[in-house]
Amino acid sequence: MLKGKTAVVTGSTSGIGLGIARELARLGADIVLNGFGNTSEIEAIHKGIERDHGVRVIYNGADMSKAEAVRGLITATVETFGRLDILVNNAGIQFTAPVEEFPAAKWHAILDINLSAAFHGIAAAVPQMKRQRWGRIVNIASAHGLVASTHKAAYVAAKHGLVGLTKVVGLETAGSGVTCNAVCPGWVRTPLVEKQIDDIAAQKNISQKEALKSLLAEKQPSLDFVSPAQLGGTVAFLCSAAADQITGTAISVDGGWTAQ
């Protein structure tokens, strides 16, 4: 389905981003990986995707907290592949604290990586996509882009902002062959969420298994995690012809979280 297309997936060396990158590669897209991590592990991921799916894969370590680095990632992709078809803005960080205790530096870091990076990537990518008369921008937001939780001021603000940015770009690119949508996952068992499970277990003096159940029961009626592969499938659908008229919207993949 995506043979001959080129996809950039930010924050794709682990977790959700890696699941999305693997699914797009499975469908034939060449992939630009981005993110932090151990050099040998990243190289193994890189080679593994190439081997498993017969596509071209490169790695770009652009720092998503730096505007020029984000725009440079887009420029470098077009220079290398001659095109950019799919941009998945997935990179994100988290920090929790009551608003009156929230460190200003953490606020700025979360806004930079979770929201501003998407803005800079989109601004750099849209002209190329418009020239091609085809492009898919998918912003990985969160259930927290639609509803709030305590102690997550910066994350919730950034993800709500990302959903708003999605709507604007969807309107501005309507009819151009370019679409822009947000995917809003509920709980996904990533390293970020593992830490929250550990914190609940420590705070309540309960086992990991009990903490996991507590986390899911509070928010996610399905009582099951969303998988990176499922999110990859959702992104792939948004890149398909069936989704040509889906733009400027947010799709929840959250086990019923935001239906409550």
Image: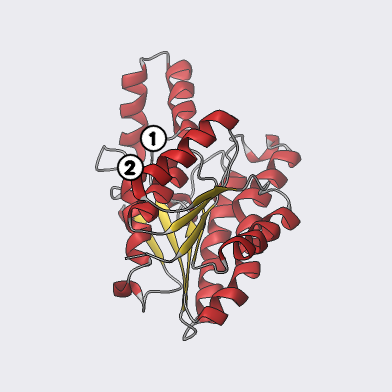
Q: Which of 259 and 55 is in front in this view?
A: 55
Which image quarter: residue 146?
bottom left
Determine the secondary structure under disc 1.
Answer: loop
Q: Find residue 43 and report its horizontal and vertical position in percent.
A: 53, 36
How far is disc 2 from disc 1 in space, using C-alphas? 7 Å
x, y percentage for residue 180? 48, 70
Q: Position of residue 190 (x, y in %)?
A: 43, 35
The reply to whether residue 31 is visible in this rendering is: yes
8 is higher (above) or lower (below) than 130: above
Residue pointed to by mark 2: 227
- The residue depicted at 36 percent of the width and 59 percent of the height is 28
Horizontal arrangement in the rendering, residue 134 relative to residue 26 (left or right): right
Q: Name the mark on residue 189.
A: 1
Instruction: Give the mark, 2 or 1, whose residue is nearer the N terminus.
Output: 1
Question: Can you say whether 28 is above or below 152 in the image?
Answer: below
Callout 2: few (<14), some (14-19), or many (20+) C-alpha neighbours within 10 Å?
Answer: some
Quadrant of the snapshot with the N terminus: bottom left
Instruction: Residue lying at the far bottom in this picture: please name it.
Output: 175
